[in-house]
Structure formats: C-alpha cells, structure tokens
Amino acid sequence: MAISSDRLIACLDMRSFYASCAAADNGLDVMQEAIAVIGNLDQKGSVVLAASPRMKKEFGVKTGTRLFEIPDDSNIRLIEPKMKFFVDISMEITRLINQYVPKEAIHVYSVDECFFELSGTEKLWGPLDQTIRRIQDDLLDLFQLPSAVGIGPNMLLAKLALDLEAKKTGVATWTYEDVPTKLWPVTPLSEMWGIGRRMEQNLNAMGIFKVGDLAKTDLRTLESRFGVMGNQLYCHSHGIDYSELGAPLIEGQVSYGKGQTLYKDYVKTEDIFTVMLEMCEDVARRAREAGKVGKTVHLSMGYSKDVFGGGFSRSRTMDELTNETLKIYNLCQNLFYEFHEDKPVRHIAVSVTNLEHESSMQLSLFEERKWKKRKLGSAMDLIRKKYGSTAILRAVSYTEAGTAIHRSNLLGGHKK
C-alpha cells in the first residue's frame, strides 16, 4: 500500500490545561504564578492534577505530588478543580477549531488534546504555519490558554511531533524523511506514544532499546512474538500509520476499564472487594452498552506510599466470553488472592480486553440462566441510564467502604 504524504494532520495540546483554566478562572497568569490544581483540598493525601510552569520549576511540584508534600509558601496558589468548567472550555476550543475545519475533520482525543486535518485549508486560510499561528493566537486571546501543535502526514507522526518536539518549541512539523533522525534515536522506548512500560520491558528483553532498534528488527520476529501488535510496532517505528482520523492507533488496544485512586488506604479485604465490585459493575455495564463481550480480565492494585508503594498487575483469560458483572468480579477475586501481598491498597484498576461482538457469546446448555442474567444486567443498565447512576446499586455501595455514591457527584473523578 502506498504511503500518502500529502495529508496535513495537526495534534493540538493545551499546555498545563487544568492549571491554565484554573488560572484564567481566578484572574491569574499561569506563566507567572505558582499554581497547583488539587483534587481535594480537605484531604492531605490528595494529588496534584496539574501544576503551572513556575510551580514545577521553583517548587518541584508536578502532577502526582501529594498535597502534604507541597511547601508552605505564600506565593503558592492551591485551587480545586471545576471539572464541568474544564469540560465546557474544552468544548469551546473544539468550536473554535470548527471555524477553521469541518466537524468531521476533528477528533477530540482528550479534554486537553485533539487532532484535526488541515488538508486543503490553504485555499481558505493561507499557508499552514499562518493557520496554526492564528489558532494559537485565538486560544490565547479568547481563553488565555497557551498551546503546542505537532503536524504530520498521519495521526501518529503528528502526535510524535507534538510529544517529542512541539511541547518544547510550540510548533513542530514531522515528515517521513524526519523519522530516521528524529524518531529512531528515541530512548527509552516508553517515550514513544503507544509503547507502555510493560511492552518496553518485553522489547528490552529482546535487545531492543531504541526506536531505531525496533525499526531494524525483522518483521516476522515481531509478529511471531506479539501478533498483530508486532506488525503495528514495526510500522509505527517507521512512522507509518494507516488509521483514519479518530480510529484507534493500535489495533487490539480497545478495552473497557476503570481506575480509581482511593481517598484513604484500604486494609480490609472486604472493603477492597466492595470497591472492586463497584468497578466491575461499571466495566461490565460499559461493555454491555457497547454490545461487547470479553475474555481477558486485568486487575492491578497500587499499594500505599506508607509501605513504600509497589503493587501488582495481572490478567487472566477465561474459557468463554462474558460481560456479566459477577463473572468478572469472581475472576478479580481469584487474582487478588493469588497476587496480593497483604498490604494497604490505594489504587485499583479493572479492565476487560480480548473483545468480540456479543453475538459471539455462546449459550451454555449447562447454564440455563445465562441469558436471564444478561437481560437482568441490561434492565439495571437502563434504569441507571434513565434515572442516574445511583438509581439502583448493590448493597455494598451503601457500606462505609463504598465509593459509588460519592463518585456519582463527581465529573472525571473530581468536583463538578
């Protein structure tokens, strides 16, 4: 298949988005003030969601820093997030971009990041660099939000140009010709978009430490080790990405998951299981609503900093496909008993992968109630969709350990 190099795709990132929005909302200059956006100012263990450049440089405070770790300094501004306000600003930014390109040419990747295609806009707005400059100027004038833009012939190179260069320079354009000089020297591998820590470890074990090493590895070797992911890794190391705007960049990445940082350390197994069941309910609901069933369940837990952190991350594949809450939960329980080290838990994440369409789910002759359970789950989903997430809950959510009721009043895990 021929590689098209005449497309112009931009990846826009709002620098320190949460801190910038909070600063604008409070009449402050994000580039001058030491600002930290804190999840909950009433909880000393709450984390920093975003920090202004001065906060990072002068006080060493960054995303993930705990509230109690922030110095007591009168120059520091601590602000709680207003998630609805942040989302509203994100939507307004999308409307702004829509003034330059059609809606179908925009893909919102996250609250503070989006892709949009500029191919053909030269006839309307002039040279590409001028259009990008106008958009960035509009963002500053209208929202007081600084930005960075990566540009490339596909989503992958646009994103890499953003992450690896534009976040330092403001704007960067990468072409296929730039791959050997700009992409191949990148190390560690997790610096490249699409390669996580676990994949990095697997590749390191094969003697692959730079993106260039990956590009020079035999394709058949990668495919035999990682399947379709191996093919994707090989293509991406050469800057090749055939996905359409808005499509997942790596096939097989689609999953349904939920992660939650707890407000306190959970020590008792029954309390941990309470939250785990709530999360399995949410994951299963999302799968059912999408008409999907999965075979592989992944459970990860992070331990308290008081025991020097750590944790585990394990997955297991079932014999049959499912989107039933209790089946996912039971497998999570098994993983917990097998890998938990009897330490306080502060973070839990559950996901279901290896997905297929629900029509692939076989009805067992030995489980007559399977379809009835599926219909019951759907009925519960419909009630929640119509009357709210707390309209129907499992009894454990009403215990002291439950978090579902509290989180129903949050947006994106934070105060609205």
Image: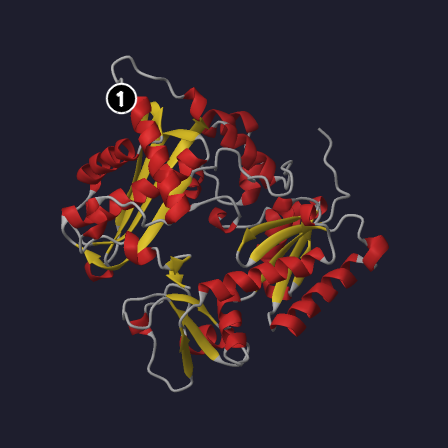
The reply, left or right, for residue 131 in relation to residue 167 is: right
Please state which of residues 301 and 326 is positioned toward the viewer in this rendering.
326
Q: Is residue 166 visible to the viewer in this orientation of the structure?
A: no
Q: Residues within 10 Å of mark 1 (few under 14, many from 20)?
A: few
The reply, left or right, for residue 302 in relation to residue 243 is: left
Image spot of residue 18 (x, y percent): 49, 67
Disc 1 residue type?
Arg
Q: Quadrant of the N terminus?
A: top right
Please state which of residues 282 and 117 is positioned toward the viewer in this rendering.
282
Q: Quadrant of residue 76?
A: bottom left
Q: Is residue 404 visible to the viewer in this orientation of the structure?
A: yes
Image spot of residue 204 (x, y percent): 43, 41
Is residue 72 positioned above or below 373 on the image?
Answer: below
Please state which of residues 314 and 352 is positioned toward the viewer in this rendering.
352
User: Which residue: 80% across, 52% down?
Assistant: 121
Q: In the displayed orientation, state which residue is furthest to the top.
A: 365
Image spot of residue 34 (x, y percent): 46, 79
User: Which residue: 15% across, 53% down?
Assistant: 267
Reading the image, the residue beneath label 1 is 369
Q: Quadrant of the C terminus?
A: bottom left
Q: How many marks?
A: 1
Q: Quadrant of residue 133?
A: bottom right
Is residue 18 positioned above or below 29 on the image?
Answer: above
The reply, left or right, for residue 368 in relation to residue 52 is: left
